[in-house]
Amino acid sequence: MNRYTPLRWKRVSLLVDKKAVAALGAFLLLVAGVAILSLGSGDMSIPPAEVVKALFGAGEGMHELVVRSFRLPRILLALLAGMALAASGAVLQGIIRNPLASPDLMGITGGASLAVVTFLTVFSDRANALTVSIQWLPLAAFLGAFLMGTIVYALAWKGGVTPLRLVLIGIGLTHAVQALTTIMILFGPIYLATQVHIWTTGSVNGANWNQVTTLLPWALLLIAWIWISARHLNIQELGDAIAGGVGSRVQRERLFLLAVSSALAGSAVAFVGGIGFVGLMAPHIGRRIVGSSYGALVPVSALIGGFLVLGADWIGRTAFSPMEVPAGVFTSAIGAPYFIYLLLRTRN
Amino acid sequence: MNGLETKALTLAYGERVVIEGLDHVFPKGKITVLIGANGSGKSTLLRSLARLLKPRDGAVLLDGKAISTMSTKAVARKMAILPQSPECPEGLTVFQLVKQGRYPYQNLLQQWSAEDERAVKKALKTTRLEQFMDRPVDSLSGGQRQRVWIAMVLAQETDTILLDEPTTYLDLAHQIDILDLLYALNRNEGRTIIMVLHDLNLSVRYADNVVVVHDKTVYAHGKPEEVITPELVQKVFGLECLIMPDPVYGKPLCIPCGKGGRKDHESLRAVDTQ
C-alpha cells in the first residue's frame, strides 16, 4: 500500500492518496506561477519578483496599486470561476456516469445565462442603467442554473432517474434555452446585445473585489462539500445497483449532488459568464493524472479548471493587446477539439 | 434461523406482474441457485431480495424483519448483492474498487478505519488479487475482473451474498473458478449464497438447494436430485431432455434432446430406459 497512507485519530479516519497530494502540490505551483505571470502582464509590465513583493505589501507603491487593486481581483475571479466550473463538471460526470457530461452540455450554464440575460433585459432602462442593484445578478444566475438542473432532473424522472435520460433531456433543453436567450437579445434594446454577447462568451474583464468576496465563500464551501461527499460520488459511478446494494440512497444523493453542481456552475456563470468546456476538460485531465477516485479528483480537477481559465484570461488580454479577447473564446478554442477527440475515443 | 424470506411478495414492472404472492424461505448457510427460463423473473426476484426493486405488494424479510423498514446501510451490513455485469469507471484500480465495499461502515468522519483496512486486505487475499491491487480494473481479464467485484462484495462482510449470473461472459474454466470461490466461502465461512445461474448442469453441481422460478412463482424447490426431472425441464424450459446421474459426482446431468449429433430417435430412448 505504498500509494496510500491512512490517517487515524480516535473516531476520525482517512486514507490519503500520496499521488493525489503530489499532483495537487504540482498544480498549486503551476497555478501560482501563471497567476504571478498574469499579475505582471499588462499596460504596465512588472517582473515576477516585484509582483510577489507587491502581493505581500513590500513592493513599490505603484506596483502595489496595479497588482493588488487592479489585477488581483480579476486573477482570483478567473481562478475561482474555473475551479467552480471544473468541480461542477466532475460531479456531473460522476452522477451521470458519462465522461461527456458537463454543465454546458447539460443546459445548466445555459439556464444561468438565460436568467442573467432576462435579468439584464427586464431591469435595464433606456439609458442602459440597471433599475436594481447589480448585486442581484449572481442570485439570478444561481436560480437559473438551479432551476434548469431541477427541470432536467424532473423531466428525466421515471420512477428514478437514469443517467441516459438525464443526458438526453439535458441536451434537448440546452438548445431550447439557447433559443430563448437569443429571442431575449433580439427583443431587447440594441446596446444590450453587445453587452450580453461579451458576457455570455465569458470574460473576467471588469472584475472587482466585491465580486471576488461574493464568489469566494460560495465556491470554496461548495467544492469542500463535494470533496467530503467523495465516497457518495465514487459509489454512484459504479452504477445504481452496486450503489443501492452497499446502502447508498442513490436517488437522494443524486438529486443533492446535482443541486450542488448546479449551484457551483451558476455561481461561476454569474460572475464570468459562460466560459465553455472547462467543466468538461478539467475533470477529464484530472482523471488522466490521478485516476477516478473522487477524493483525489475533486481538488485536482478544480485546480486544473482554475489553471485553464487563468491561462485563457492571461493569453486573452496579452496576446492581442491592446484588444482584449474574452477568456471563454480560448477555452472553447481548446475545448471544442478536445470534445471531438473525446467523442471519437469513446466511440471505440 | 430465519435468513431471507418473502411474504406474499408481488413484483411487477408497470402493468406486467412478474412474481405473484410468493411465500418462500431461503435456507440460511446454504447455496441456493435460482433457475428458470429467460424472462421468468428470477433476476427480478433476486433484485427485490436485495431491495433494489420495490415490491408491488408483500415484503422481503431478513432475519424476521422487513427490509423496507430497516435503514439501507443496516441491510448492506447483512446482505450484499453483485448485479449482472457491473461497469467500472475507466482507470479505477482494484484497490479503489474493492475498498468501496466498506461504504456501509463509513461516515463523514470515519472514512478508513483499521477495520476497513483489515476487511479489504482479507477480501483481496480470498480472491487472490493482492498482486493486482494497484492495477486498473479495466486492464484485467474477464475472470480476474469478476473476482474483483466479488472481492468488493466480500469487503462488505455480510452473512448473505446475492449474485446475479456471476459467470456470464466467462469461459468454462473461469466459470468453475468463480463457482469454486463461492463454494469455498459457503463451506469455510458458512455464508449464505443465493445466485441466479444460467447453466443447468453447473447449477445442480454447486447448489444445495435449487429454486425453480416459473409461472410467476417458485414452481419447485429443494435438493437438485429431487427437483430436476425431465418433466420439470419440459414444463419450465419447454425443452425435451434426458436426466441421468453424472458418472463422477452423481448429480443430475441434463442431456438436451437437440438435433446435433443425433443418429436416430430410438437410440436415445434406449439410453433413457436403461
Image (cartoon, coloured by chain):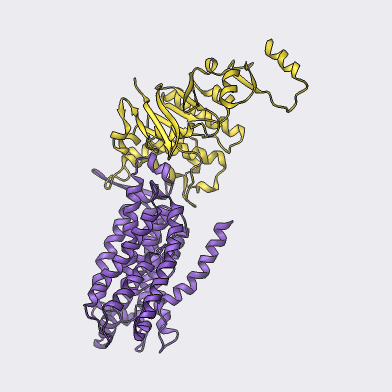
Chain colours: A purple, B yellow
Q: Nearer the viewer, residue A176 or B182?
A: A176
Work out whether A33 lies above or below A294: below
Which residue lies at the image location 55% right of the left edge and 22% below the top edge? B204
Residue projecting furthest to the front: B15
Work out whether A37 lies above or below A266: below
Residue projecting furthest to the right: B263
Work out whether A51 lies above or below B224: below
Q: Nearer the viewer, residue B20 or A114?
A: B20
Residue A127 locus on image (x, y percent): 27, 88
Res. A42 in view: yes
Which residue lies at the image location 27% right of the left edge and 71% below the top edge? A138
Instruction: Count every numbered label the image shows and give the total.
Output: 0
Residue B139 locus on image (x, y percent): 55, 48
Residue A164 locus on image (x, y percent): 46, 53
Residue B241 horizontal side relative to residue A334, left or right: right
Give residue A89's quadrant in the image. bottom left
Residue projecting furthest to the top: B274
